[in-house]
Amino acid sequence: MTIAEILLQDFDVEISNTLRTLERVPDDKPDWAPHEKSMKLGKLAMHCASLPLFGVYIVEDEGMDMANSTRPQTSLVFESRELCLECLDESSAKCRAAIASASDEHLEKLWPFSFGEHMISNVARSMTFRMMCFNHLIHHTAQLGVYLRLNGIPVPALYGPSADEQWSPK
């Protein structure tokens, strides 16, 4: 099995989990946040929906300097759940295609990630993808689950049962 095939197995699970969570985001609370330091619900939902684009950059670019990125900034403006789900569909399709076309040799190359002169990481592209795309997406999808709970919205069963749903393997 290739590195890409392994990444795609995890990718499909995590995108499914994110989709099932985003499907529950209410249209009428984009500015709600549990704390003044917390990201607004709508912005968090859009961040989850667009995060797969960062995975595309990891696979396609030779590295990234966040202080001087040539990639366009993603809009995190929440207009509706429907548009948020479309964003996830588009970003995940691009990311899945990028992973599927990557060779083991390409995914084993170092991917320098910095902010100006400050090096954040410089490890294999596959490791960077797992840390900066998968882990980042899992973290924020779980955070969104807490937002749902605090708004009385049922939380989906993702890795096992939630207080609202039984879990069954898909």
Image: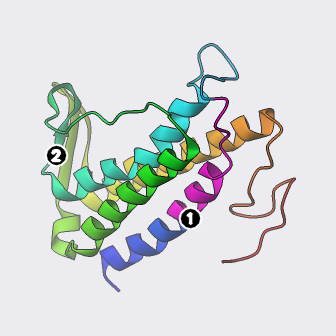
Nearest the viewer among 109 and 150 is 150
Nearest the viewer among 55 and 63 is 55
> x, y (%) of residue 156?
74, 56
| Image quadrant assignment for residue 60 | bottom left
The quadrant in which the N terminus is found is: bottom left
Residue at the extreme right: 163
Mark 1 packing: few (<14 Cα in 10 Å), some, or many (20+)?
Answer: some
Residue 121, labelled with which disc?
A: none
Mark 2 packing: few (<14 Cα in 10 Å), some, or many (20+)?
Answer: some
Residue at image position (32%, 50%) is 53
Q: CA distance from mark 2 to mark 1?
A: 28 Å
Residue at image position (46%, 75%) is 9
> x, y (%) of residue 71?
18, 39
24 magenta-colored: yes
Question: Can I make out residue 124 in this image?
Answer: no
Image-based side of 136 in relation to 144, left or right: left
Per the image, the residue denoted by label 2 is: 63
Residue at the extreme top: 36
Which comes before the other along the chain, label 2 or label 1? 1
The quadrant in which the C terminus is found is: bottom right
Nearest the viewer among 126 and 73 is 73
Residue at image position (66%, 24%) is 32
| Image quadrant assignment for residue 37 | top right
Amino acid bearing label 2: Gly
Say whether marks 2 and 1 touch (CB < 8 Å).
no
Per the image, the residue denoted by label 1 is: 16
Image-based side of 75 in relation to 101, left or right: right
17 magenta-colored: yes
